[in-house]
Amino acid sequence: MNSLFSLGMWLAGTQGPFSTVWQRLTDKTFRGLYQPNGFDVAILLPYFVVLVVLAAYGGHRYWLVYNFFKHRHVEPGPPPAQSEWPKVTIQLPVFNERYVVDRLVESVVRLDYPREKLEIQVLDDSTDETIDVARACVERCQTLGFSIHYLHRDNREGFKAGALAEGMKTATGEFICIFDADFQPHTDFLRRTIPYFQNPRIGMVQARWTYMNRHYSSLTEVEAILLDGHFVMEHGGRYREGSFFNFNGTAGVWRRTTIEDAGGWEHDTLTEDTDLSYRAQLRGWKFLYLMDLECPSELPVDMNSFKSQQARWAKGLTQVARKSLPRILRAPIPLHIKAEAFFHLTANLSYPLMMLLSTLLLPAMIVRFYQGWLQVLAIDLPLFLASTCSISSFYLMSQRELYPKTWKRSILYLPFVMALGIGIGVRNSIAVIEALLGIRSEFVRTPKFRIEGEQPENWIAKAYLRRSGWMPWLEVTLGVYFALAVVYSLQNENYATVPFLLLFVGGYAYTGAMSLGQGYLERMRFGLASGETRPAATGAPSF
């Protein structure tokens, strides 16, 4: 028995209970008998390739943090004085948002901006009672003298991008401001953004998201930390270094001629905002990021909604990579901008790579065990640290930047942040693979429940129903698989790997169990048996 393969064949022929097989597998006497063969190389080669690639993306996170602090002197500064306010069209794309559409409209009409210079479009693709709620809200504001229009489409052609393009046909504003249904801009939003457009090269101004329901649950706390990392270290680092960054689909203002010059809204990707952003910046337009300008929004409060949102973003960015990277790499722009665009648009490839690592980890651990733990400490551990510790520093630095007095509290959430990032890997991996294969899918919007702050109100009482499908069962299965890997490590006194393995156990088990549990509660709420769907007459989205 001079290889893992022959060891496996010997075990396969062993008679007796599983405990006997496990005891022989973990027998330390086999260490001295081990010699590598082709089977072991077939395991270790992809294992190390994946580790190196993930470590490269981890190194990129370090680079973003470095750029953020290196160029921290690069700030937009106060806006110049505005002598005359231009005409602005505010577009509010809505789809089945019965709980929040009135809050959205009411917050927009409260904006401190000359009323005669403000046009509001409610772009409604809804198929439920949101139609009546939105129309009534628009009519109420019209009686108060606001220039607000209700535009309803009977189809979702182009999804959000299609709705925005349709609104552009009748929009009269020189600038286009966009807010999603769950946003609630402060009254000075336009007065703090429009003056920057006096620079004729500025094509878009983006604000930073904040979260009304950040402290609602542990899930929303973790979501907030994840998004803070994006809006501080990613957006901040890219903007300060002079690289391309993207409009986030909401809480931003566009120069109308920028949209038109870049070719308008296109709906061949699920992230039409990123697609348009890269096309516009390749045309020479400059984007401005105002990290100090906050715009409150609502985070998903249930696991299934959060996973569908993350999958949509992962698939959309990968679609934009397929569509735009060849053009970006050929463009006459600095190399550092090309490199940053590559890492940005391909970042979600780490999800299928992480899934591959998940399947290779246990057999690779066995092979490495018989090679000796000195090699593991010298090779495997540094690669693991490069890909995982970068996550900790990335999110910790963003919390320290935003909350200098209370940022240490976020340390308690870091294991959950890392575990949740692992747990959503199954759903996101499928989304990325679909994008690479050119498989199209509809734009599945994230339902909002109007859960604000720390409320006792339970989101499950709201009338939405989402099917969890089969993926949670796979996630739970992966959790069990890594639990066995933990047992193997403990039995072989490989204690250094246990914390990493527990992240995989917790991530997969938590996301899977939460999806199954919340799906069960929803079905109980609507009195549905397994396999049934809620009647369409009730207005629930059929996602």
Image (spheres, rainbow, N blue to C red):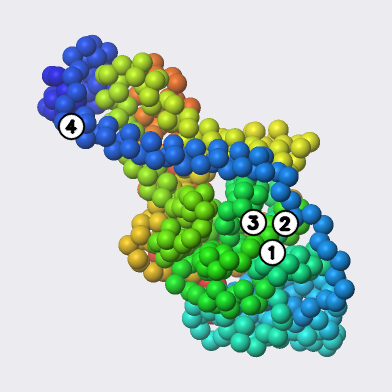
65 lies above or below 200: above
Q: What's the CA distance linking mark 3 and mark 2?
A: 21 Å
Callout 2 environment at 10 Å: few (<14), some (14 to 19), or many (20+)? some
Q: What's the CA distance linking mark 2 and mark 4?
A: 54 Å
Residue at x-position 68% and y-position 57%: 289
Q: What's the CA distance linking mark 3 and mark 4?
A: 47 Å
In which image quadrant can residue 412 be found? top right
In which image quadrant can residue 380 be found? top left
Q: Nearer the viewer, residue 107 or 318?
A: 318
What is the secondary structure assignment of the residue under circle 3?
A: loop
Name the amino acid, label 2: Leu
Among the two numbered marks 2 and 1 on one chain, the one whose residue lies closer to the N terminus: 1
Q: What's the CA distance linking mark 1 and mark 3?
A: 22 Å
Q: What's the CA distance linking mark 2 and mark 1?
A: 7 Å
Label 1 sits on residue? 205
Among the two numbered marks 2 and 4 on one chain, the one whose residue lies closer to the N terminus: 4
Residue 39 location (% of width, % of height) = 18, 32
Q: Do the residues under discs 1 and 3 have CB atoms within 8 angstroms?
A: no
Q: Nearer the viewer, residue 394 or 12?
A: 394
Q: Do the residues under discs 2 and 1 have CB atoms within 8 angstroms?
A: yes
Label 4 sits on residue? 39
Residue 205 location (% of width, % of height) = 69, 64
Residue 202 location (% of width, % of height) = 68, 66
Q: Do the residues under discs 3 and 2 have CB atoms within 8 angstroms?
A: no
Q: What's the CA distance linking mark 4 and mark 1?
A: 54 Å
Callout 4 environment at 10 Å: few (<14), some (14 to 19), or many (20+)? few
Label 3 sits on residue? 299
What is the secondary structure assignment of the residue under circle 2?
A: strand
Name the amino acid, label 3: Leu
